[in-house]
Image: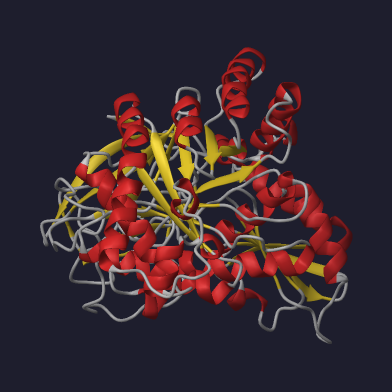
């Protein structure tokens, strides 16, 4: 049987293949898109391993293979084996052990037991926190159940997948990046151009405001022109004040409608009100249900989606009187709408709980997730810090809010809201996702901050390395100033560039030193090493946008 692999593979194990008595070399690198012949091992533990023999090599490389149907990505059954592939590593894990030590029972006898690692030291064999979860090299949305505190891996909240046009939000899909144009929707050409710029920059879902019926009608022409001149980009219509008629019209032309529960049914504030009676509360609640029902039905029947987008600054009067200006009021506002949708058998829902204060936003999302889980609701979450501002501080606020929740496993799609050109939001989104290991859209650079031991101009060298390799997303490259801490601190990188002596640098493949070269030839020799290993891609062969680069690597 022949298998095609789309990524280079490194095996941190030593073993004997069935056809050879020699030990397979440590950290063997195999080129991309290589074909392998397969021979299966059955280990004494009952776990099956396979030898994938590279067509140009005489020896094999041992990798794990599924032995039974995976019932869940978080399966904890010791009999089920997960295949985990990080950037270049293969990992074997079961519900009982951190490392598999199995002697093949097949023709040929291994001189050593097989031990597979995935990088730095891990807790000892038999640790009870090991629960298997499959990992995909590109989505990289990985974690092991109940182990985040020990290893830092992210365990994502289980959610259903909701289709927004051609994009799936939630489930096991990558966290989706979205933004919003700021052009007037009535300017058809301007709106189409803005949507295209965002999409080409890597934005996967684009939101457009529709404050009037005229804007709702305009969405039909925007959608049609995108299909004619570019492609069918997933679009979301933003509907606010007293928007039932607007929502019903625009639902014909877009892939998702966003409503704000606090504004969708207009409630004129009563300055003399001191309380909301239960009767008044229920009357307003029923009015919301009656107003939402036609939109829910049309979206349900068309197979389209809705975002219930609660904003801290626009809670309805009855929510403010009942719960105060609090995260609880935000959560109850969303839950009220969700329950109406469930009564009408509509489940294509995505929920957001935005606030301009990071701590309010964090509390609201956490509370909502807790309440939804208690009621068996598995709807995806859209994360964002609204009105974050601009510049460095706006980016910091957004990263604190969005990044914190993603690290806790909450969130299926994100939008960074900046008072700038929306295209500038996209790099921030991808930076957050890359930093957390949730998506790989660019090269991961590991570099020390420099100190008195540094043997070259680290800032300049890092810039030169980046310029030479930035078009190859999925790689991890370390640039370290000296030999003292460099090799250890760059252990997770695929390749390393380390100062060895004045005027000399060492190139590493993983943890293994490959060669020492003159400093002025360092970047050139690093590129040559990538070419030797079959991982180099010419810059003009890689698509421009982050999303397209990610797809190209996959």
Between 473 and 327, the one nearer to me in the picture: 327
Residue 159 showing in the rendered view: no
Between 540 and 483, the one nearer to me in the picture: 540
Marker count (numbered): 0
The quarter holding residue 477 reads bottom right
The location of residue 163, given as percent across then percent down, is: 39, 35
381 on left or right of 472: left
Identified at 19% across, 49% down, the residue is 70
In this rendering, is residue 257 above or below 138? above
Q: Quadrant of the N terminus?
A: top left
Identified at 79% across, 79% down, the residue is 450
In this rendering, is residue 8 above or below 214? below
Residue 385 showing in the rendered view: yes
The location of residue 298, given as percent across then percent down, is: 34, 28
Residue furthest bottom in the image: 452
The location of residue 259, given as percent across then percent down, is: 47, 45
Residue furthest front in the image: 272
Between 446 and 428, the one nearer to me in the picture: 428
The location of residue 16, given as percent across then percent down, is: 30, 55
364 on left or right of 485: left
Between 254 and 259, the one nearer to me in the picture: 259
Identified at 26% across, 54% down, the residue is 73
Name the colour scheme. Answer: secondary structure
């Amino acid at each position: 049987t022949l298998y095609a692999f789309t990524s280079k593979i490194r095996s941190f194990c030593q073993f004997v293949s069935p056809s050879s008595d020699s030990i397979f070399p440590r950290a063997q690198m195999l080129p991309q898109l290589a074909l392998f012949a397969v021979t299966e091992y059955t280990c004494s533990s009952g776990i099956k391993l396979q030898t994938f023999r590279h067509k140009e090599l005489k020896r094999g490389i041992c990798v794990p293979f599924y032995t039974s149907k995976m019932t869940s990505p978080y399966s904890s059954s010791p009999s089920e084996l997960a295949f985990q592939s990080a950037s270049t590593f293969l990992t074997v894990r079961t519900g009982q052990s951190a490392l598999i030590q199995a002697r093949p029972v097949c023709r040929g006898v291994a001189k050593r037991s097989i031990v597979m690692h995935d990088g730095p030291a891990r807790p000892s064999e038999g640790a009870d926190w090991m629960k298997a979860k499959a990992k995909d090299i590109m989505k990289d949305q990985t974690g092991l159940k109940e182990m985040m505190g020990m290893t830092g891996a992210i365990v994502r909240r289980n959610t259903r997948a909701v289709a927004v046009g051609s994009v799936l939000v939630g489930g096991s899909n990558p966290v989706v990046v979205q933004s919003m144009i700021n052009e007037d929707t009535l300017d058809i050409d301007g709106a189409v151009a803005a949507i295209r710029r965002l999409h080409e920059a890597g934005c996967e879902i684009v939101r457009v405001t529709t404050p009037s019926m005229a804007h709702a009608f305009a969405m039909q022409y925007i959608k049609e022109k995108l299909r004619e001149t570019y492609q069918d980009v997933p679009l979301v219509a933003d509907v606010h004040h007293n928007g039932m008629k607007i929502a019903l019209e625009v639902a014909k032309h877009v892939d998702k409608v966003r409503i704000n529960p606090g504004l969708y049914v207009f409630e004129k504030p009563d300055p003399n009100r001191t309380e909301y009676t239960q009767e008044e509360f229920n009357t307003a609640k029923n009015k919301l249900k009656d107003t939402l029902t036609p939109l829910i039905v049309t979206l349900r029947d068309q197979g389209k989606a809705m975002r219930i987008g609660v904003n801290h600054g626009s809670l309805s009067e009855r929510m403010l009187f009942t719960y105060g200006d609090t995260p609880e009021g935000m959560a109850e506002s969303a839950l009220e709408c969700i329950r109406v949708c469930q009564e009408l058998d509509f489940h294509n829902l995505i929920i957001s709980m935005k606030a301009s204060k990071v701590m309010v936003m964090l509390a609201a999302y956490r509370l909502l997730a807790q309440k939804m889980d208690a009621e068996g609701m598995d709807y995806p979450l859209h994360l964002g810090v609204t009105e974050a501002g601009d510049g460095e501080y706006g980016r910091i606020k957004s990263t604190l809010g969005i990044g914190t929740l993603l690290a806790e496993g909450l969130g299926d799609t994100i939008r960074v809201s900046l008072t700038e050109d929306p295209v500038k939001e996209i790099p921030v989104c991808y930076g957050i996702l890359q930093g957390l290991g949730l998506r790989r859209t660019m090269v991961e650079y590991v570099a020390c901050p420099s100190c008195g031991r540094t043997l070259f101009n680290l800032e300049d060298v890092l810039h030169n390395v980046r310029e030479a390799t930035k078009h190859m997303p999925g790689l991890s490259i370390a640039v370290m100033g000296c030999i003292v801490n460099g090799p250890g601190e760059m252990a997770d990188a695929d390749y390393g560039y380390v100062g060895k002596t004045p005027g000399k640098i060492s190139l590493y493949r993983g943890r293994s030193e490959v060669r020492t070269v003159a400093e002025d030839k360092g970047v050139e020799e690093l590129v040559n090493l990538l070419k030797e290993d079959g991982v180099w891609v010419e810059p003009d062969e890689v698509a421009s946008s982050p999303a397209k680069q990610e797809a190209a690597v996959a």
